[in-house]
Image (tube, rainbow, N blue to C red):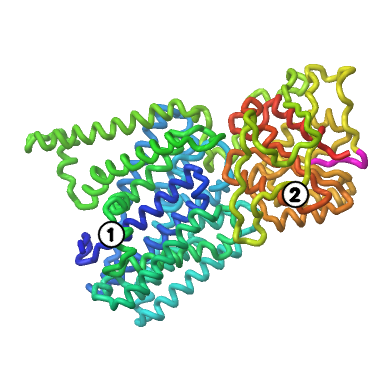
């Protein structure tokens, strides 16, 4: 086997293959591919890998030299990680300066925190969600994971040195490390709030350290330098079997889980980390079949460049994609984005990372000083190739960025807030709008999730069931129905025309609880539903509806018919939904309105609402998602908030669907 730059350390090509699997899982997740809903776990795989390799390196150095040279360790880490990141950030700033200079101000905090490897805590303290945000994200928002690793690289050598000095037994050292991992996981489980945004526990160094520490514990009991001897056939079979099981578990979780699965934060990520540790143990063993499979040449080539691919993929996706993804992922664009990410990573690896890492700076110094007399042909060729590759990459990114619709929209970062205001005509009065063409139907009822027709987009498929008992399962065939809407009257006059339908009278009172979408439709709902009480708030989550209902009940203001329009801003659990329905009571009618939000949680939310309506006799579902299909003109640029015509259509649908 090949050795790397650290003495006689073994090169384990299978680990590069595992890196490839992890980085492309993350890319698939950021491309919103439906078969990779758990792709965010690829970051967890990287944590376990880093914990193993760094600890293995430190322990081996201590055994060889009877000490760990901390200064040289940190210098090597800096030379390995900083140049590629700085180069990527330089290109991002250059492209934004040319294509959308206004966005630079909105990401200045992201840039500064990235340079200090504190991105994760910056995002936590500024309440920037990884999962629930509107508008184009920051192109360097993914650097939070590098901050976690760099903080580990800074502190772990000091802690490990102390542990090894005090505890000579490998077994006891591993147990101490695993105890630390248990504390980290306990922090995640305690801080996680079901049904709320999990960004705090996802970002935190304290809540994510268990992955790094599980890898570190493996390095103590399974050091690569001690595995060079031959294994018995039975031993090799056992190791490969464990590795295969770990790989199968990892792939399954990448495909079958999601960011809102409660089980992920109650032990699922630990399971993933242990599964990855099994794969590493098998790959680190000589003659491993799993190692040979993952160490094949294509996977190895990509894995060697996986750090650069990770660095580049997110800015490429953000800066060459639509400002707000309101439809299905474009396959051609996705392939081009992946190709551009790999090409930029390959360029960075060859011309930035490796020369600096290996100390081969002379060609670059000559280029920068334009002193190419020494074999001018070779240096000229190097300069021409590097210039062409970088120029082409920049031109491609700039051209696509100029036409992707991002211009004029601030990045969602800690400086700009999570939800940019919609600046269109939706602030005008309801009376100012013209008639709205609302689809009519002759069917006596419209099912909650109607079968798609040629004129209607197919509803988003329901997500796979969560392992958690509180998480919503697949959307069943819904029992509740909504009445078909009647043609919308001309709303150009605030007074109803003689032929217009009369407002719905709220028998016993009607209460509507919702978020900003409900606020968009409020003027029209008050016009169409007599006496309706509307309680809407921007950014409201379903988890906050309970306290709203409790307050209205205490004040005796909750109507006999309650409309719930929530889910736009994130998911929730079945437990929260059922508790809310039980609190409202069986003596009241409840109307749930599902959501159209081009975000990862849309299908989970709609599935949960459909399931809740099917399980309770007093609950009805209004299918706004299906009703608004192919009606892009109803929506603001974020694909969620409503323009005047959309707000009017929404109110009309709700009013016509209320139970008699």
In the picture of the structure, the residue carrying the numbered disc 1 is 13
Residue at the spot of label 2: 545
- For the N terminus, the quadrant is bottom left
Q: Is residue 202 left or right of residue 79?
A: right
Q: Nearer the viewer, mark 1 or mark 2?
A: 1
Location of residue 563 by image quarter: top right
Q: Is residue 511 inside the magenta stretch?
A: yes
Depth check: give the residue in front, 163 or 629. Answer: 629
User: 368 or 586: nearer the eye?
Assistant: 586
Q: Quadrant location of residue 503? A: top right
Q: Is residue 240 above or below residue 633?
A: below
In the image, what residue occupies the spot 63% across and 39% down? Answer: 459
* Above/below status of 520 relative to 153: above
Q: Residue at x 69, y 50 (%)?
A: 476
Question: Which secondary structure, mark 2?
Answer: helix
Residue numbers of the magenta segment: 507-512
Q: Position of residue 145 (x, y in %)?
A: 44, 53
Decide whether residue 431 is among the magenta residues: no
Choose the circle earlier in sequence order: 1 or 2. 1
Residue 119 percent across, percent down from the top left = 46, 50
């Amino acid at each position: 086997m090949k050795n790397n730059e650290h003495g006689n350390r073994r090169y384990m090509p299978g680990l590069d293959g595992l890196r490839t699997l992890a980085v492309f899982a993350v890319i698939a997740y950021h491309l919103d591919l439906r078969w990779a809903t758990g792709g965010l776990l690829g970051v967890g795989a990287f944590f376990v890998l880093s914990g193993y390799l760094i600890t293995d390196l430190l322990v081996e150095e201590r055994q060889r030299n009877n000490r760990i040279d901390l200064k040289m360790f940190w210098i090597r880490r800096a030379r390995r990680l900083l140049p590629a990141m700085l180069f990527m950030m330089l290109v991002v700033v250059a492209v934004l300066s040319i294509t959308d200079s206004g966005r630079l101000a909105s990401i200045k905090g992201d840039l500064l925190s990235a340079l200090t490897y504190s991105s994760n805590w910056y995002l936590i303290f500024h309440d920037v969600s990884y999962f629930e945000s509107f508008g184009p994200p920051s192109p360097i928002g993914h650097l939070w994971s590098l901050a976690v690793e760099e903080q580990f690289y800074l502190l772990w050598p000091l802690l490990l040195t102390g542990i090894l000095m005090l505890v000579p037994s490998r077994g006891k050292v591993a147990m101490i490390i695993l105890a630390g991992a248990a504390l980290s996981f306990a922090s995640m489980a305690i801080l996680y709030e079901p049904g709320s945004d999990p960004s705090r526990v996802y970002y935190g160094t304290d809540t994510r350290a268990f992955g790094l520490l599980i890898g570190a514990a493996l390095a103590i009991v399974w050091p690569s330098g001690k595995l060079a001897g031959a294994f018995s056939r039975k031993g090799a079979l056992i190791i490969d079997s464990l590795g295969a099981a770990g790989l199968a578990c990892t792939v399954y979780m990448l495909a079958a889980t999601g960011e809102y699965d409660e089980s992920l934060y109650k032990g699922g990520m630990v399971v993933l980390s242990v599964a990855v540790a099994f794969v590493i143990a098998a790959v680190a063993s000589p003659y491993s079949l799993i190692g040979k499979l993952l160490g094949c040449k294509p996977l190895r080539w990509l894995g060697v460049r996986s750090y650069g691919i990770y660095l580049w993929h997110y800015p490429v996706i953000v800066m060459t994609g639509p400002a707000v993804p309101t439809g299905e992922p474009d396959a051609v664009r996705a392939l081009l984005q992946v190709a551009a990410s790999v090409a930029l990573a390959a360029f960075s690896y060859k011309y930035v990372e490796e020369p600096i890492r290996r100390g081969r700076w002379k060609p670059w110094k000559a280029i920068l000083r334009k002193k190419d007399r020494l074999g001018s042909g070779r240096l000229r060729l190097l300069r021409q190739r590097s210039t062409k590759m970088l120029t082409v990459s920049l031109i491609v990114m700039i051209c696509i960025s100029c036409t992707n619709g991002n211009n004029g929209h601030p990045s969602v970062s800690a400086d700009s807030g999570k939800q940019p205001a919609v600046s269109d005509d939706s602030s005008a009065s309801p009376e100012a709008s013209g008639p709205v063409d609302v689809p009519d139907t002759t069917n006596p009822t419209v099912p909650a999730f109607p079968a798609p027709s040629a004129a209607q987009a197919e509803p988003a498929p329901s997500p796979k069931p969560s392992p958690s008992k509180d998480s919503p399962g697949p959307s069943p065939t819904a029992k509740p129905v909504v009445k078909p809407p009647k043609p919308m009257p001309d709303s150009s006059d605030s007074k109803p025309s003689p032929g217009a339908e009369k407002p719905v009278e709220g028998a016993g009172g009607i209460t509507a609880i919702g978020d900003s979408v409900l606020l968009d439709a409020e003027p029209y709902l008050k016009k169409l539903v007599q006496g309706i009480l509307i309680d809407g708030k921007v950014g409201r989550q379903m988890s906050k509806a309970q306290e709203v209902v409790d307050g209205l009940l205490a004040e005796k203001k909750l109507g006999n018919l309650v409309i719930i329009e929530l889910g736009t801003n994130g998911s929730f659990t079945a437990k929260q939904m059922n508790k809310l329905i039980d609190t409202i009571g069986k003596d009241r009618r409840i109307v749930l309105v599902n959501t159209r939000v081009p975000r990862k949680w849309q299908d989970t939310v709609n599935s949960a609402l459909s399931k809740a309506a099917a399980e309770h006799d007093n609950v009805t579902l209004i299918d706004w998602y299906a009703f608004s299909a192919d009606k892009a003109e109803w929506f603001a640029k974020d694909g969620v908030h409503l323009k005047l015509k959309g707000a009017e259509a929404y109110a009309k649908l709700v009013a016509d669907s209320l139970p008699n």
